[in-house]
Amino acid sequence: MSVSLAEHRLGGLRWIVLNGPDREAFGALGEHVRGELAALAEAWPALPRLRHHVSGSPGRELLAAVRRATAESFPAEWAELAAFAAGARVQFDDLVLLNLRAASRRPIPARPGSWTSSPARRRAASAPTPDRTAAG
């Protein structure tokens, strides 16, 4: 089966429709966004700090533990991420760091003194307010 990729706009939202075998599809997606992802990897100010964080203790050990645990439980997702990185021609380890930073419940510093993680922002954004109750 071949891969098909079509990009659309839904208002201001970029919408990419991707069909095909998982690894090939993620490789094609990586190739499609190669320029954007390479620019992000080079320009994102937190990436050098993330690299530094995992170059020594305790970051190196924590990253290794997460990789072992998730690779055992989610080998297909790791293969997809590897295919995406290869298609985009970005370093696989950088893509792993960027993904883990975004999904981390134990935040990695984005900048010195900053410990806000994406889940923390989501929790804060979903906290009940006078016009928005916990029930919805």
Image: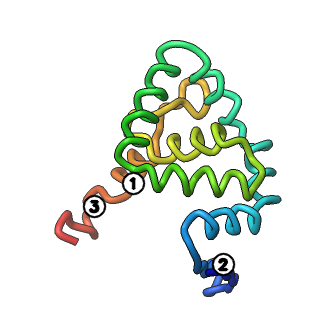
How far apart are labels 3 and 1 at the CA level? 14 Å
Q: Mark 1: which amino acid?
A: Arg
Residue 97 coordinates in the image, percent (x, y)? 58, 38
- Mark nearest the camera among 3 and 1 is 1
Please report whichever mark, 3 or 2, sits nearer to the chain's N-terminal start.
2
At a point 54% along the width and 30% down the height, the residue shown is: 109
Q: CA distance from mark 2 to mark 1?
A: 34 Å
Residue at the disc numbered 2: 3
For image coordinates 52% across by 40% down, the residue present is 101
Instruction: Report the front residue among 120 and 36.
Output: 36
Give the amino acid at mark 2: Val
SS under mark 3: loop
Q: Is residue 91 above or below residue 74?
A: above
Q: Which mark is residue 122?
A: 1
Q: Position of residue 89 (x, y in %)?
A: 78, 51
Of the 4 image quadrants, the one containing the N terminus is bottom right
Q: Residue at x 39, y 48 (%)?
A: 119
In the image, what residue type sits under mark 3? Thr
- Residue 67 drawn above or below residue 29: above
Residue 25 percent location from the top left of the image: 62, 70
Mark 2 residue element: loop
Q: Earlier in the sequence, mark 2 or mark 1?
A: 2
Q: Nearer the viewer, mark 3 or mark 2?
A: 2
Which badge, 3 or 1, comes first in the chain's sequence?
A: 1
Q: How many numbered markers are drawn?
A: 3
Reading the image, the residue beneath label 3 is 129
How packed mark 1 is, by other alpha carbons closer than 10 Å (few <14, some 14-19, many 20 or more), is few
